[in-house]
Image: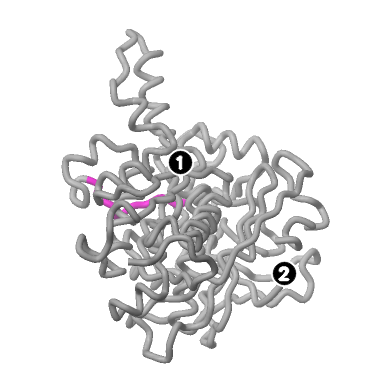
């Protein structure tokens, strides 16, 4: 395998795995996103709250996908393990293709095992009180997605969970790039996962006036960049990307989706939740044709950056940009921005940028930056934008 200690070698994306409100596998998610099909709908879990709709994962059967082990995992971990399995299969990696001590796992989360914490606190505070499940801690703590993926796949390299709020998935990709270029790993599984949909989180974000309140028309509630946008729609899901050194990929005759050129980071240092009013942090981390998938998927918090990076790689590989769903008219606050909307735009995508911004002021961009198709062969997938 690769020699340790060498820097600035090419890093490529060879596998993608996704579980999102738009579908429980990458091909389904990409098709729905290119078609601009929104997933927001009333959610029984949020009944009685001011915002009673979400973008929920609806076609994922944890028992069918993960077997009896699913019972030992919080939902955020279930999503991550399923996405990781798909990504590894997509990269055509097997036990003989890697040294498990040289494979890293960087899967972050925004809120971790919130469902487990809420369920078990309900048991303890109920009438009569009941003892909590002894697996509460191991199921709910934030590093369990990364740790369980490593356990599931038998990987012995670094297994870390990063948290930079809604920039988490993108941060994981940046750190994965560093691990590969530093020679500490030959392969890294990187991404993000979250399962935050609950009355608590809905109320918390609504109190911040961050959520859309379009209860009468939830399907058109998530309206990125639109003049009449009134907040995001809470969502759940996961994405995992397989990153490898280009030299190793060539040696085994595989064609990657795209090359990861670099990443950048900055912090507003302005406010706990509000971005700098002049966008200084975003400018530090860049400009181009703009599209958002959140009109389809909603906002998956810690998973959002990873899912959007996967869409970026697919845009490059397929030569097309999915539309921004439910965008009708730009506001006066974004003149001159080329927003892709209405239908997918069929065009070569030589270089693309995936930006993420989160509470606390982290700016991750223009990262991951992805190069043009790695070679002139036909796209890896039959689907296209």
Residue in front for this viewpoint, 338 or 252: 252
Examine the image and state in which quarter residue 90 appears: bottom left
Q: Residue furthest top?
A: 128
Q: Residue furthest bottom?
A: 376
| Residue 296 appears in the picture as rendered | no
Whole-percent x, y for residue 259 in the image: 49, 74
Q: Which residue is disc 2 drawn over? A: 330
The quarter of the picture where the N terminus appears is bottom left
Whole-percent x, y for residue 352 in the image: 58, 75
Q: Which residue is disc 1 drawn over? A: 197
**Crowding at mark 2 (Cα within 10 Å: few <14, some 14-19, many 20+):** some
What are the residue bounds of the magenta stretch?
55-62
Classify mark 1: helix, strand or loop.
loop
Q: Residue at x 27, y 44 (%)?
A: 151
Q: Residue at x 67, y 42 (%)?
A: 360
- Asked if 192 appears above or below 125 in the picture, the reply is below
Q: Is residue 61 magenta?
A: yes
Q: Is residue 284 left or right of residue 53?
A: right
- Asked if 343 appears above or below 235 in the picture, the reply is below
Task: Between label 2 and label 1, give the one nearer the viewer.
Answer: 1
Classify mark 2: helix, strand or loop.
loop
Q: Residue at x 18, y 50 (%)?
A: 64
């Amino acid at each position: 395998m690769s020699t340790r200690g060498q820097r600035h070698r090419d890093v490529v994306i060879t596998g993608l795995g996704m579980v999102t409100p738009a579908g429980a596998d990458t091909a389904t998610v990409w098709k729905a996103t290119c078609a601009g099909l929104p997933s927001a709908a009333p959610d029984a879990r949020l009944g009685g709250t001011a915002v009673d709709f979400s973008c929920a994962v609806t076609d994922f059967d944890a028992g069918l996908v993960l077997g009896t082990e699913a019972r030992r995992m919080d939902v955020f971990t279930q999503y991550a393990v399923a996405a990781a399995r798909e990504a590894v299969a997509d990269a055509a990696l097997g036990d003989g293709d890697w040294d498990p001590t040289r494979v890293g796992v960087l899967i972050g989360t925004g809120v971790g095992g919130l469902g487990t914490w809420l369920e078990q606190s309900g048991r303890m505070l109920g009438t009569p009180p009941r003892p909590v499940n002894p697996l509460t801690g191991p199921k709910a703590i934030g590093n369990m997605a990364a740790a369980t993926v490593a356990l599931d796949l038998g990987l012995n390299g670094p297994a870390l969970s990063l948290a930079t709020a809604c920039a988490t998935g993108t941060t994981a990709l940046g750190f994965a790039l560093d691990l590969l270029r530093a020679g500490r790993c030959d392969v890294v599984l990187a991404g993000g996962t979250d399962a935050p949909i609950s009355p608590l989180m809905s109320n918390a974000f609504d109190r911040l006036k961050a959520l859309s309140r379009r209860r009468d028309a939830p399907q058109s509630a998530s309206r990125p960049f639109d003049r009449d946008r009134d907040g995001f729609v809470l969502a759940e899901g996961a994405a995992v990307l397989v990153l490898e050194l280009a030299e190793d990929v060539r040696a085994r005759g595989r064609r990657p989706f795209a090359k990861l050129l670099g990443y950048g980071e900055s912090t507003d240092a302005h406010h706990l939740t509000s971005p700098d009013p002049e966008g200084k942090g975003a400018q530090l981390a860049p400009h181009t044709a703009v599209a958002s998938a959140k009109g389809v998927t909603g906002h998956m918090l810690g998973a959002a950056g990873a899912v959007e990076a996967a869409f970026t790689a697919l845009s490059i590989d397929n030569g097309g940009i999915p539309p921004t769903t439910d965008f009708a008219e730009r506001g006066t606050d974004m003149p001159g921005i080329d927003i892709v909307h209405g239908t997918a735009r069929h065009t070569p995508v030589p270089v693309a940028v995936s930006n993420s911004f989160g509470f606390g002021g982290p700016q991750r961009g223009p990262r991951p930056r992805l190069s043009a198709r790695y070679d002139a062969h036909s796209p890896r997938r039959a689907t296209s934008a």
